[in-house]
Image (tube, helix red, strand yellow):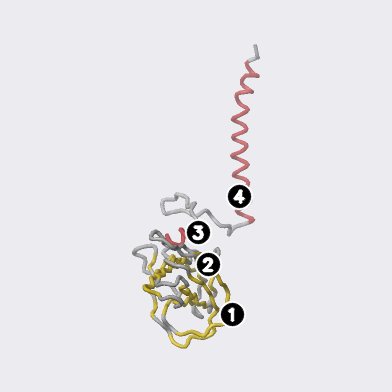
Amino acid sequence: MRPEKEIQSLMLEPVLKVAYIIAYGSLLSNVLSSVYPYRQEFLTFTDSSLIVAQRQFYKIWEGKGYQVGYRFEDVGDNESVDIYVENPEGSGKLVYMLVPKISPTGLCFLDIYEVTDVTSHGTELQPMNLRTGANEGPVLRIEYGGTYVTGNRLLSDVIPGGTSVRAVGTVAELGEGIIFDEGSRILIRITNKSASTAYIGIRLVWWEE
């Protein structure tokens, strides 16, 4: 049978370990605070619950996330539709576009060009702020139907289409995402190659800061 003092020592050991960990953690936190006074804190809601979703969701919560969508109807075979996207000079913001999606009902060619000049502006699309009730509007300009002078072709791709009564085409994403610096502008051109008329939808989602 173990002596009473040995038993007390064994019972006290875990308590001392916990106390040591707490004290060490507090000391480490104070040291980090002095060395890195401007370190990034965890993102939280107003009730202090942690935000563990992707950064885009936090920007939506701040009222800085946007989306716009448009549908082109009865696009003839070999006809093209253009979407012009611009972050104007002097906007003071970077634009982070994460979900540029194109969804045609038939086979289409996709080409993206840099824009060197705008001969005439088209119809500007009105984005939706993804936090309903937020008043802040975007700097990004998105339009269709204008006349543009294009430079280098930046991307060339094919968007497959269906061939039966159940065909709904497919969705094409333009890479992993695009960051628009001030003064950046591109033209997204979709050409119907389905040998019949087609519907072409486009949806852009982004945040600005």
The numbered disc on residue 30 is: 4
- Please state which amino acid type lies under the numbered disc 4: Asn
Q: Which residue is at the front of the view, 17 or 74?
A: 74
Q: Can residue 150 be seen at all in this image of the molecule? A: yes
Mark 2 and 4 residues: CB-CB less than 8 Å, in contact?
Answer: no
Total count of labels: 4
Depth check, mark 3 against mark 4: the one in front is 3
Q: Is residue 60 above or below residue 109?
A: above
Which badge, 2 or 4, is on the more N-terminal residue? 4
Residue lying furthest left in this view?
Answer: 133
Which badge, 4 or 1, is on the more N-terminal residue? 4
- Please state which amino acid type lies under the numbered disc 2: Leu
Depth check, mark 4 against mark 1: the one in front is 1
Which badge, 3 or 4, is on the more N-terminal residue? 4
The numbered disc on residue 174 is: 2
Task: Describe the element under mark 3 as helix, strand or loop.
Answer: helix
In percent of width and height, residue 75 lies at 40, 75
- Please state which amino acid type lies under the numbered disc 1: Asn
In percent of width and height, residue 39 lies at 58, 57
Residue lying furthest bottom in this view?
Answer: 119
- Please state which amino acid type lies under the numbered disc 3: Arg
In percent of width and height, residue 185 lies at 52, 78
Q: State the CA–CA distance, disc 4 to disc 1.
A: 54 Å
| Residue denoted by label 1 | 152
The numbered disc on residue 55 is: 3
Relative to 182, 81 lies left or right = left
Task: State which quadrant residue 135 falls in.
Answer: bottom left
